[in-house]
Structure formats: C-alpha cells, structure tokens
Amino acid sequence: MELEIPAEDYSLDESLAPSFVSSLYVKKRDGLWTKVVGCLSGQLEFIQSKPSVVIVRSKASVDEEELWRIAIQQTGLWRGSFERMTKDLPPGLREAADGLARAHPGVRIPIAPTDFTHILTAVALSKRADYPNLVLRWCERLWRRFQGDLGNIVSSSPEELRDIGTSYQLFDMVKTLKAFLDIPKGLDRLPKELLKKLPPFKEPVEGFLLKVGPDVTRLILLNLCFGLGPKTTDSLILSTFEGGLRFIPCDSHFRTVTTRLGLLEAKGTELPQKAFCKRYACDRLTSSCLSISECPRSNSCLRSRFLTLGDLGAWFQTLTYLQGREYCRRVRPYCERCPLARICEFGNVYLKARRKT
Ligand code: SF4
Ligand code: SF4
C-alpha cells in the first residue's frame, strides 16, 4: 500500500533525527527511513523526495486508516506546523521561537505510542550518553540481537549484554525495564490522593499508562521506575503521548540556549529535581486535577518557567537541542556563523570579546 501525506513546512530528516522515534528506524539516505523494530517492523518506509509530501509505503496487511494513523504519528505530521502557532507567545519568547524556527525549519514531534517499550529502552540508555553516536548504536545492536523483544532483553545474561557494549547505561537499562514490568506490584506505594484516581490495573503496563494519561504516568514512572529521572521521563512522555507536547525534557542545551537568548537569568534557575517531581505538580491546574500539592520550587524550576509554551514546549525544546548541537556549544559557541546572532546579546558580547583578544 502507498499513501501520500501532505507535508507543508515539514522536514522528515529534521523531525526524525533528534527524536527518540528515530531509534526505531534506519535512515537509508536523506529523506528515506525504514522501520526496523516494533509495530510494522520491516514493513514501513517513509520517503520525502519533494518538500510538501511524504510517501508512506507498507507491505503489511493493515487497513489504510490504521496505516495513516501510525504514519502521521511517527513522522510528526499528526500536528500542524508549529511555526504558525507562535503568535500568542509573550514577545521575547516569540522572537526566540521564531528565530530558532528559521534556523531549524520543518521540525515536528514524532510520537510512537504503539512502540512504547522500545522508546523506553532508548530513553533509558540516553542518560549521560550521546544520542546519535552511542544510543542509536546500542539500540541497533539490541534490536538485532534480541529481535527488539523486551522479554528477551530483560532476561539477557551479562555476557549477552557485554556483546552490545560494556557501558553502565546498558546494565541500568535492564534494571529500568524490569522495574517497568513490576509497576503493577508497586502501585500502592504511590501518593494516596493519586491512588484514589487510578482505574483498576489492566495489562500491559504501557496500555495502562497510556490510558491514565501523561501527568499521572509521569508520577508513576518517577516513583516506581528505577533509573528514570525528570528528563528521561519527560522524553518518554513527549515521544509516546499525543498529550505530551508540553512535557519539556530539561537538558543542558535547553538551559544554555534559553539563558543565552536572555529568556532566563543566568543564576537562580534550577533543573527539575526528582525528589520534588515524585511528590508535586508543577502548576496549579495539574495540582487541582490530580489533587496533589503544587511544587514549592515552581518559581525557580526551569521546566515550570517554560510551561507558558503550552503545546509548543516539546517543539521549542527540540529546536534548542538542534541549536545547541550545531551552534550554541557550552564552550566556544559558533556565534560568528549563528543565525540567531542578531537577537542574541550574549553572542554579541562574546564576539566583541573575541575580537579584542
Ligand atoms: S516545578 Fe517541581 S515538580 Fe515541576 S519539574 Fe520542577 S522540581 Fe519537578
Ligand atoms: S549567537 Fe552564540 S550564544 Fe547566541 S544563540 Fe547563537 S551560538 Fe548561542
């Protein structure tokens, strides 16, 4: 079956490459991605050979509606162009968002709820590990060695894992997957108010989490899943839930770029802390929906400071990730060729200082 999805203002490569969904695919060449694990593994291909359309090819016996749904989710085309939605942002934030969007055009947010456990595996591996160079390499070996089967990965021997790599992230990832499968046994350890709101548990775990929604899932994972912190949990949620676009994984690129663009004070803003994220809600609305207290750190926390982005949050954070990798390195940023130099005071001060030396 072949489908054509309209794709205005869209880049398949720029959308998939920074997303954890890319761990499910192999990029054969620019504009051609083939699925290698999970749902429709080996039977799904995305091709963008002209700007405004994505071709979806599949040999699977799946009906057209289902194929369309999976394809728009995993390409990111389930949402319209974020670039056109910045007009309601506060002025400074809007200028930064528009500048970043011009520098990194066509980015959307792919999601793969049907491949929740594979995304969890990739996310668990990403702690202090470079995504394109390490995580993707480990994932490719894991999918090949264990046929991408979570049960096979969880029951693998240390020798089998050492064939994939010797880094601690691989061994921690297995502990994370085991803890994930044990979530039903630990539900009664959750805050009482939250427990009252949960529906009866039904297998599989990922189906249950997708049903209870992203805010409750965040609390469950942070309380019961070994090895997941605020950043990895938010990464998992934004890659698997349609309601996950406001879940910003606060990484170093996000903090560096937003600070340098003058959106934050250089001092006084802190990264989310797991001990607080396990017990509190970031904002008043979530607090009243879940009947748990609002976080006492919400005024100083990086994540809560950017909740005003709403559904633009994950997109904006992805742009800062791309910006951080390409130009805004923590040490010796490439301000001289950065497309945002015109609006970046830090960059101008930095360039003047360099010219003097
Ligand atoms: S405001 Fe509190 S609960 Fe929210 S991310 Fe920050 S530390 Fe976590
Ligand atoms: S001008 Fe320099 S500091 Fe500013 S965003 Fe660009 S690379 Fe970063």
Image (spheres, grey):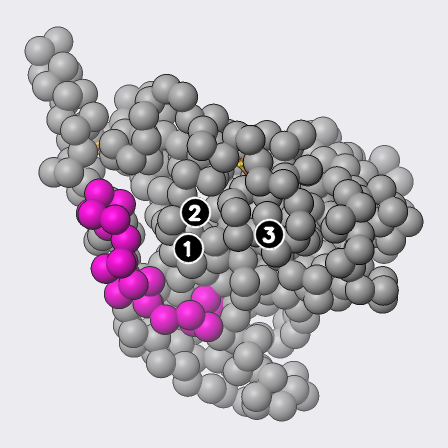
In space, the residues marked 3 and 2 are separated at their CA atoms by: 16 Å
Q: Identify the residue position indicated by label 1 in the image.
A: 310
The residue segment tinted magenta is 75-95
In space, the residues marked 3 and 1 are separated at their CA atoms by: 17 Å
Left or right: 152 in relation to 43:
right
Number of callouts: 3
- The label shown at residue 342 is none
* For the residues bearing labels 2 and 1, Cβ distance under 8 angstroms: yes
Above or below for 112 versus 192: below
Amino acid at circle 2: Leu
Q: Identify the residue position indicated by label 2 in the image.
A: 307
Residue 235 in magenta stretch: no
Residue 48, how many percent across, how many down? Answer: 37, 72
- Disc 3 vs disc 1: which is toward the camera? 3
Quadrant housing residue 42? bottom right
Residue drawn 36% across and 25% down?
A: 330
Q: Identify the residue position indicated by label 3 in the image.
A: 288
Amino acid at circle 3: Ser
Left or right: 179 in relation to 322:
right
